[in-house]
Image (cartoon, rainbow, N blue to C red):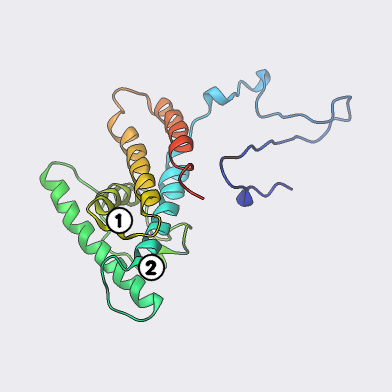
Amino acid sequence: MVRLDALRPPCQAIFWRPSLESRARHRNPLFRDETYLAPSNICVDWLHNHSLGVFQEWLSGAIHAMCRANVYEVPGTTWHEKLKGTCAAIVRNMKAWGQRELREGREQNVLLELTPHMVGDEGGSMPGVKGAETNSFIEFMWEELSSGIGHKLDKSLDWMRTSESLYKIRLLLKLEKQKWPVPTAQVKLLTFHVHHVYRYID
């Protein structure tokens, strides 16, 4: 049994179908002429792979890193108190950022609430945060870290580079719809993601 969740990307996954008891026992049925399925006509599911996947995992890790560095200098002696204060500061700054974006004609899906429970475990999904909210969160976080906060983090250069890469991935589909059909953009996104994000993450 293949443990896909335990694999560390980039990785190679091979799926076999049961043997037909012929001379060739091992077959890969996903890619073949009869199914008209090939790597060239498979697209990335933006919502689950990016918005609810990589984006949320990175955001969760970034928020934990911001809390460890106490970038907002919030009071508290316990981890929960500091994480709660960090979340409150993020929401406050994100609301102000959303207002600035709106004045410039860009409407964002700003989080109205962020709790330690919604942040979840470090590097995991973020319960209760929707895909559209995550997309805006990525844009906000890039600006927030670029404002000087990012330099306070441990491994700050890695966080800044991955933030920029994810921000570019977000903009690639958001701004280029008129130039590229969505499936084409998503294939390019996958290539960009593999080359520019995982190179910075252990």
Q: How far across and down, in percent of the image, does residue 9 sit?
A: 56, 43
Q: Nearer the viewer, residue 169 or 31?
A: 169
- Disc 2 crowd rating (10 Å Cα; few below 14, some 14-19, many 20+) is some
Residue 110: quadrant of the picture? bottom left
- The residue lying at 38 percent from left, 67 percent from top is 68
Mark 1 or 2, nearer chain start: 2
Instruction: Residue 77 in the image: state x and y as whole percent.
Output: 35, 81
Query: Which numbered circle lies on residue 151?
Result: 1
Neighbor class of circle 1 (other Cα within 10 Å; few <14, some 14-19, many 20+) is some
Of 118 and 167, nearer the camera is 167
* Left or right, 86 with reference to 42: left
Q: What element does badge 1 sit on? A: helix
Where on the picture, by quarter, is residue 78?
bottom left
Q: Residue at x 45, y 47 (%)?
A: 54
Q: Is residue 102 above or below residue 60?
A: above
> Is residue 174 positioned above or below 116 on the image?
above
- Residue 41 vs residue 86: left or right? right
Marks 1 & 2, CB-CB < 8 Å contact = no
Residue at numbered disc 2: 68
Q: Amino acid at mark 1?
A: His
Left-right relation of 102 to 84: left
The picture places residue 148, in percent across and down from the top left corner, at: 24, 55
Q: Calculate the distance from the C-alpha at mark 1 to the C-alpha at mark 2.
A: 13 Å
Task: Give the residue type at disc 2.
Answer: Arg
Relative image position of residue 149 (x, y in whole percent): 27, 58
Say if 182 sits above or below 114 in the image.
Answer: above
Is 198 situated left or right of 119 in this image? right
Dot 2: element: helix
The single residue placed furthest to the left in the displayed view is 103
Q: Nearer the viewer, residue 67 or 32?
A: 67
Can you tell which quarter of the image residue 105 is in?
Answer: top left
